[in-house]
């Protein structure tokens, strides 16, 4: 009963005119960045971070959440009509959706993608409402050893999953940990790794690094390495679905939601794996297998679209209850929380109940807004692709510089921004993932504090991490995540050699 009262209070906050405006702005920006290839939600949230520091915390979070799941809706539009996925999670949609569009069924593909996103987003939000408070209550029993082990799991999984190789992921993570150590030591109070530069005594702002890596680095990469895009637009048809389309889509939406939600709740989340799994499942179960890869099967659009939206919504569970981001955008939203002096984690439901429940309520409201934005206005969104790339990238650079300078009015911050932008460019060029840098910067100092506290409890003994069953289990899982993929790859290679 208390749960529903809290949710009703959340709706009362989220439905105020000003918060509805911010939710609409977030959905609008999210859809736009989903449509534009290369401009993902992480970049959009990173660019807006410095500007929204003057906006009330609840309104900012509602807007960022709108951008996050709005990008998933928008990405399907260009995937289907132009075969240009705006987000990695919509790559599968492009495979079948574009084939449907080429055979005159673009409207049905767009409708099943939008309705599937709505169904998955709403079901996943209901699951977040039901389970997130319970998980937070359970997490309150965690002590410093469990928290340290959990952060190790976040480091390992984020580094292993968000990149081409574990080594590159771990390199990025250590870079983030090193940047996070710059500044005042929280326990001794002494300055460290400042190289004698007074501006570094207060540490390096996560927002500045996020804007540098995602906005400046991505814009530079686009200018230097991406050629002129060539798009073939398919004709829009009616967005009405036939009775057969509904019959084939509804089970696929539900299966996609069931697959996507668990992936969003674990630290090794990400939208790519559940969407590909959903596609494989639909292909196996379909009675129209001949349509896959030829004229386009509607189940191949409905299932993956539902899966990626359920994953994105479920990412709110570890973010709010444990303070652990499971994706790049969630990592930047975590830094936004910290910008407001709010620490997501088990106590968030007690210390910032109004904000959390307003945020959860806004997910329901945002889903309805996105359905309205995506079905009738699809033609308008596609016109965004007419923005010339030079003007787009120039705008991103100017916007990023203004935002960072506005934080402290410091010229040093601008130099640091473009230096980190060059670092982001090099990382993108040589396939080093950038998300682990942000995760390392945010969670590194917290992990250090928890490790010191745990060692104090254990009177200096490192065995304290293995004496408590939960902490020991999580550390063993870390080891499995690092070792198991190598073992499986080795066995697959041996099997191939034996077969050859």
Image (tube, rainbow, N blue to C red):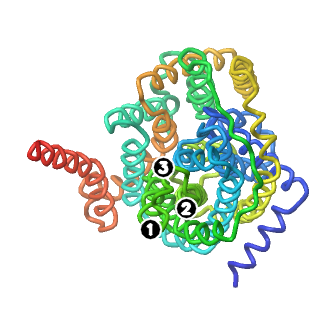
Q: Residues within 10 Å of mark 1 (few under 14, many from 20)?
A: few
**Upstream in the sequence, badge 3 or badge 1?**
1
**Upstream in the sequence, badge 3 or badge 2?**
3
- Contact (Cβ within 8 Å) of mark 3 with mark 2: no
Tell me: residue 137, above or below residue 53: below
| Residue picked out by circle 1 | 285
Instruction: Say which of 32 and 192 sits in front.
Output: 32
Tell me: residue 151, above or below residue 199: below
Residues under labels 3 and 2: Cα distance?
12 Å
Q: Residue furthest left?
A: 498
User: Is residue 337 at all visible to an observer of this figure?
Assistant: no
The residue at the point 59 percent across, 63 percent down is 347
Is 32 left or right of 433, judged from the image as shown?
A: right
Q: Residue furthest bottom?
A: 1
| Residue picked out by circle 3 | 293
- Contact (Cβ within 8 Å) of mark 1 with mark 2: yes
| Residue picked out by circle 2 | 299
Residues under labels 3 and 1: Cα distance?
15 Å
Looking at the picture, how far across and down is residue 273, in whole percent? 44, 52
Q: Residues within 10 Å of mark 3 (few under 14, many from 20)?
A: few
Instruction: Say which of 461 and 112 sits in front.
Output: 112
């Amino acid at each position: 009963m208390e749960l529903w009262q809290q949710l009703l209070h959340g709706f009362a906050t989220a439905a105020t005119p000003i918060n509805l405006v911010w939710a609409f702005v977030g959905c609008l920006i999210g859809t736009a960045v989903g449509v534009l290839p290369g401009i993902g939600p992480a970049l959009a949230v990173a660019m807006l971070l410095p500007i929204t520091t003057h906006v009330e915390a609840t309104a900012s979070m509602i807007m960022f959440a709108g951008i996050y799941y709005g990008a998933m809706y928008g990405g399907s539009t260009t995937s289907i009509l132009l075969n240009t996925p705006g987000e990695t999670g919509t790559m599968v949609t492009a495979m079948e959706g574009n084939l449907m569009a080429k055979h005159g069924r673009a409207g049905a593909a767009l409708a099943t993608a939008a309705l599937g996103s709505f169904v998955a987003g709403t079901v996943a939000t209901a699951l977040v409402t039901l389970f997130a408070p319970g998980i937070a209550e359970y997490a309150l029993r965690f002590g410093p050893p469990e928290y340290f082990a959990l952060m190790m799991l976040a480091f390992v999984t984020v580094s292993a999953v968000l990149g081409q190789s574990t080594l590159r992921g771990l390199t990025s993570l250590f870079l983030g940990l090193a940047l996070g150590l710059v500044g005042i030591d929280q326990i001794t109070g002494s300055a460290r790794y400042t190289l004698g530069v007074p501006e570094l005594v207060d540490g390096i702002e996560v927002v500045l690094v996020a804007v540098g890596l995602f906005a400046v680095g991505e814009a530079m990469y686009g200018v230097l390495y991406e050629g002129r895009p060539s798009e073939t637009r398919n004709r829009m048809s009616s967005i009405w679905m036939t009775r057969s389309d509904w019959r084939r889509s509804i089970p696929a939406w539900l299966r996609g939601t069931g697959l996507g939600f668990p992936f969003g709740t674990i630290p090794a989340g990400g939208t790519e794996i559940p969407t590909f799994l959903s596609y494989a499942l639909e292909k196996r179960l379909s009675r129209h297998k001949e349509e896959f890869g030829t004229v386009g099967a509607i189940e191949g659009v409905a299932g993956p679209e539902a899966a990626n939206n359920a994953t994105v919504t479920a990412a709110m569970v570890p973010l709010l209850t444990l303070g652990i981001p499971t994706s790049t955008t969630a990592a930047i939203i975590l830094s936004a929380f910290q910008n407001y002096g709010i620490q997501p984690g088990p106590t968030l439901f007690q210390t910032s109940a109004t904000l959390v429940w307003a945020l959860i309520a806004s997910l329901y409201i945002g889903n309805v807004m996105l359905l309205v934005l995506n079905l009738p206005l699809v033609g308008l969104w596609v016109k965004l692709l007419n923005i010339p790339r030079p003007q787009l990238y120039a705008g991103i650079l100017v916007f990023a510089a203004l935002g960072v300078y506005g934080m402290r009015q410091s010229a040093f911050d601008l130099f640091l921004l473009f230096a980190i932008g060059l670092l982001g460019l090099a990382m993108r060029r040589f396939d080093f993932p950038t998300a682990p840098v942000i995760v390392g910067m945010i969670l590194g100092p917290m992990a250090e504090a928890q490790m010191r506290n745990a060692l104090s409890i254990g009177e200096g003994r490192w065995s304290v991490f293995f004496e408590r069953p939960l902490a020991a289990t999580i550390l063993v899982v870390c080891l499995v995540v690092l070792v198991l993929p190598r073992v499986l790859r080795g066995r697959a290679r041996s099997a191939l050699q034996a077969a050859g």
